[in-house]
Amino acid sequence: MTRTIIESKSKTAIIGFDEPFCVIGERINPTGRKKLAAELEAGNFSTVEKDALEQVACGASMLDINAGVVYNSNPNPHETEPILMTKMIELVQGLVDAPLCIDSSVPGALEAGLEAAAGRPLLNSVTGEEERLEAILPLVKKYNVPVVAISNDDSGISQDPDARFAVARKIVERAADFGIRAHDIIVDPLVMPVGAVASAGIQVFALVRRLREELGVNTTCGASNISFGLPNRHGINNAFLPMAIGAGMTSAIMNPVALPVGLKKLDEKRAALAAAGIIVPESIDPEILAQITGMGSTKGRAGKEMEAIRAANLLNNHDTHGSVWIKHNKPVDEEGKTKSVRSRRRQRRA
């Protein structure tokens, strides 16, 4: 069975055919997050700290670290990103013991991350482009780390799943020339948005099976890509992840945290209730209001996607005796302790 070993200084994450699905937390990434990008340029790492702690608390086995900020003061990422990557990795591994995934399009930033990271991190990523293969595979060999292989090349991202499989095979074969074995390659077959490509789900499930059976590699993806541009994205993600796991996918780069409900949304709900003749006391705790109105929580907590993944692990016999499922679904008493089935029965009889 293929097993990819990723390590921090004190913890090991295993991605494998016979292992529970591995969640790689994606939140430490300034792409599309203007506030975080501005904070990082200003040397403010408070959001990075919060994202690291929350993601691990919500079930991430690994954390992806992306330092892709284009500074207003210096737009050259080859100069700024290696320094920022080093700072972020040193900060995060000082807060949590989760293994890291070093994510950058800048080879210098990848090497800076490899120098700063303790243990055996995952490198994200190499593609089938010749220039990228020549730049990244020597780093993978030099530092003896596993790597994410993305199924696109000089011709771009193909809509043909057979072409994407061919790129993956090319990367595996080129890696072998450097002495890098297949178990240290995690292929991202590229999930297309189902709103744009109706067969996107079917394509990726078939690709994952082929990658597993023909190349013997582990797989990953950007899980939320499947629902891009559609309403109720969590509903689609919740269905996609167990189906992908059933097809043989072994990891995903995703957000394990359900984003908290903000005060603005709560004020809007309070106004809507008032318009319907329901008066909510001004003194009500915001968390209680969020929960009783079905809005979620004002605190970061594990998202529904994590529940779907734990269920899939259970159904695929990757959760010994159902211990993880039971742990996360037992009622909790006022002191924060889980109640046993026997105590709940006694409560009902009383």
Image (cartoon, grey):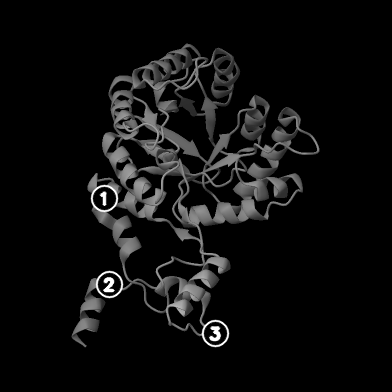
Q: Residues within 10 Å of mark 2 (few under 14, many from 20)?
A: few
Give the quarter of the image for residue 201: top left
Q: CA distance from mark 3 to mark 2?
A: 34 Å
In the image, farthest residue toward the bottom: 350
Q: Nearer the viewer, mark 1 or mark 2?
A: 1
Q: In the rendered image, which residue does mark 1 sit on? A: 314
Q: Residue at x 48, y 48 (%)?
A: 255
Q: Position of residue 23 (x, y in %)?
A: 43, 44
Q: Which mark is residue 76?
A: none
Q: Nearer the viewer, residue 72 or 282?
A: 282
**Mark 3 vs mark 2: which is more N-terminal?**
3
Q: CA distance from mark 3 to mark 1?
A: 42 Å
Q: In the rendered image, which residue does mark 2 sit on? A: 340
Q: Position of residue 166 (x, y in %)?
A: 38, 15
Res 321 visible: yes
Q: Which amino acid type is marked by label 1?
A: Leu
Q: In the rendered image, which residue does mark 3 sit on? A: 283
Q: Position of residue 20 (x, y in %)?
A: 34, 44
Whether residue 98 is situated above or below residue 322 in the rendered picture: above
Secondary structure under the numbered disc 2 in the rendered image: loop
Specify the quadrant that holds the C terminus. Answer: bottom left
Give the quarter of the image for residue 160: top left
Q: Which amino acid type is marked by label 2?
A: Ser
